[in-house]
Amino acid sequence: MLQLNLKRIFKARGIEQPYKFLAQSGFVPFTAHKYKNGKVEHMRLDHIEKLCTVLNCTPNDIFEWSPDDLLDDRPDHPLQKIRTREKKIEITKLLSKMSLEKLEEIEKLIEANH
């Protein structure tokens, strides 16, 4: 089953108020609430595009897959790339523990690759 999971990317992007972010990005309150909570049965393609634009990501970043059937759960299944991700991105926590010198090094690396 495909599922919308924006929590992971909100955290990675440092978005502390997802509902507010979505509403300010042009989603109506009802839709912003549904998307924030991942309670979605269907989505409009223009909404997928808009989410990817405002979050600077691809659809693979906002969707996750959990196999409904054991027959689908095979290593070569194309949806394995977006399989439900257990690992959360905790970059903020990691950065907060680094020395200023290390942070400056990381900043230079990011600038060089951006």
Image (cartoon, rainbow, N blue to C red):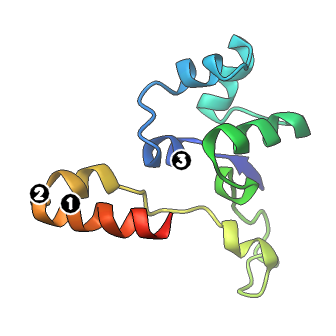
Badges 2 and 1: C-beta atoms under 8 Å apart? yes
Q: Name the residue under label 3.
A: 9
Callout 3 crowding tier (Cα within 10 Å): few <14, some 14–19, many ≥20? some
Callout 2 crowding tier (Cα within 10 Å): few <14, some 14–19, many ≥20? few
Is 109 on the left-hand or right-hand side of 94? right
- Residue at (71% x, 86% y) in the render: 75
Which quadrant holds the N terminus?
bottom right
Callout 1 crowding tier (Cα within 10 Å): few <14, some 14–19, many ≥20? some
Cα gap from disc 2 to disc 1, whole angstroms: 5 Å
Residue 93 locus on image (x, y percent)? 24, 51
Q: Relative to the observer, which residue lies in front, 111 or 72?
A: 111
Q: Earlier in the sequence, mark 1 or mark 3?
A: 3
- Residue at (79% x, 80% y) in the render: 77
Q: What element carries label 1?
A: helix
Cα gap from disc 1 to disc 3, whole angstroms: 22 Å
Marker disc for residue 103? 1
Amino acid type assigned to the residue bearing label 3 in the image? Ile
Amino acid type assigned to the residue bearing label 2 in the image? Leu
Above or below — where is 103 with respect to 12? below
Q: Mark 2 points at which residue?
A: 100
- Residue at (16% x, 66% y) in the render: 102
